[in-house]
Image (cartoon, rainbow, N blue to C red):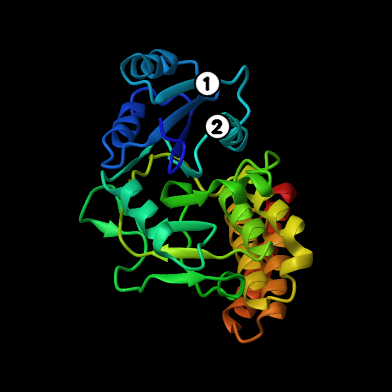
Amino acid sequence: MNKEGLVSIIIPTYNRAHILPRAIESVLNQTYQNTELIIVDDCSSDNTQEVANNYCNKDKRVSYIRNKENLGQSFSRNEGIGYSRGAFLMFLDDDCEYLPEKVEEEITLMSSLSPQPAIIYSNMWSEKIGSQALCPLNKKGKYIFKDDILNCKYYILGPPSWFCKREIIKRINGFDVNFYKYVDLDLLMRVIFTGECLYFHNKPLAIVHFVPGISERTHKNLFYRELLLEKHFSKIKKYKRFLSYLYWRIAKDSFHLGDSKKARDYCWKAFISSPLKVEYLFKTILFSFKKLKRNSLVKNREER
């Protein structure tokens, strides 16, 4: 295996033996063959180990690691990074798949760009080829710098769309294991804070499959969104539009989870950060009214 130009592809997985082969096959069927595939099993209780070992026995490019306990996606990806040997890193979720030309097209693009970005991220199809792209197809490919992201002038997709320079991912110590959610945004923010740039390639080169029943509005997700804000606040506080966006997302999630007070407080912060967004002011009033209405209903029930 030629280490020059070697691409390491890491699939973290947990209890997805029934769909894991689709992701694995999409890697093994790449037109660019100088790859290694590292499957990191986060202590699955199904037959994931059997599925992975079958591929290891058939193809020497495939390796399998099993965590001793369930430690999350960030830990699993970092385990894969530590085991990998490639100059480039890719991260494929077990419920997504690559198009056959993805690796070849992105390694060719990386070598042609000057300056070379830390990460190329490509567009993705939703569910099937030719359906809906996650980013508008008419957007031009472009370099993405810190101010583009923090002024909300960007389209950012998750790790299955990424093609990364290994040296930079290693330099920032990979994924933050303290995060269960929003690990991708946290990593991208740490990359751009080092002065590196990204590059958006507007061609769908992967397919994302949405697993039903996974709610984006849970108390755990809300906790990690607030943790992301706290971790990076000192560096993003001057970017009022981005800060306002994060405040608003926390406010909206809090409201749907039944915490009207937190929703109102964060919505007010969103408005203060971005006063031109008058809708935040109206939402603050609405959330306050909802809280008063909810308190009144509780009081009436207690009096009965």
Which of the pair 154/5 is nearer the observer? 5
Q: Furthest-bottom residue in view? A: 276
Disc 1 marks a residue whose amino acid type is Ile
Which of the pair 225/130 is nearer the observer? 130
Q: Quadrant of the N terminus?
A: top left
Q: Mark 2: give few (<14), some (14-19) or many (20+) Cα within 10 Å.
A: many
Mark 2 or mark 1, which is nearer the start of the sequence? Answer: 1
Disc 2 marks a residue whose amino acid type is Gly
Can you identify the residue that label 1 sits on? Answer: 65
Q: What residue is drawn where x is 44% and y is 37%?
A: 9
Would residue 153 be found to the left or right of residue 289 on screen?
A: left
Query: Which percent across, then down, holds residue 259?
Result: 68, 55
One can see residue 206 in this view: no
Would residue 47 be found to the left or right of residue 247 on screen?
A: left
Q: What residue is drawn where x is 62% and y is 17%?
A: 68
Q: What residue is drawn where x is 61% and y is 35%?
A: 78
Q: Secondary structure at mark 1?
A: strand
* Rendering quarter of residue 46: top left
Q: Tags 1 and 2 in contact by the CB under 8 Å rule?
A: yes
Vertical arrangement, residue 235 with respect to residue 256, above or below: below
Q: Secondary structure at mark 2?
A: helix
Q: Which disc is residue 179 wearing? A: none
Which of the pair 136/275 is nearer the observer? 136
Please count the marks in the image.
Answer: 2
Can you identify the residue that label 2 sits on? Answer: 80
Vertical arrangement, residue 144 with respect to residue 123, above or below: below
Would residue 246 be found to the left or right of residue 13 on screen?
A: right
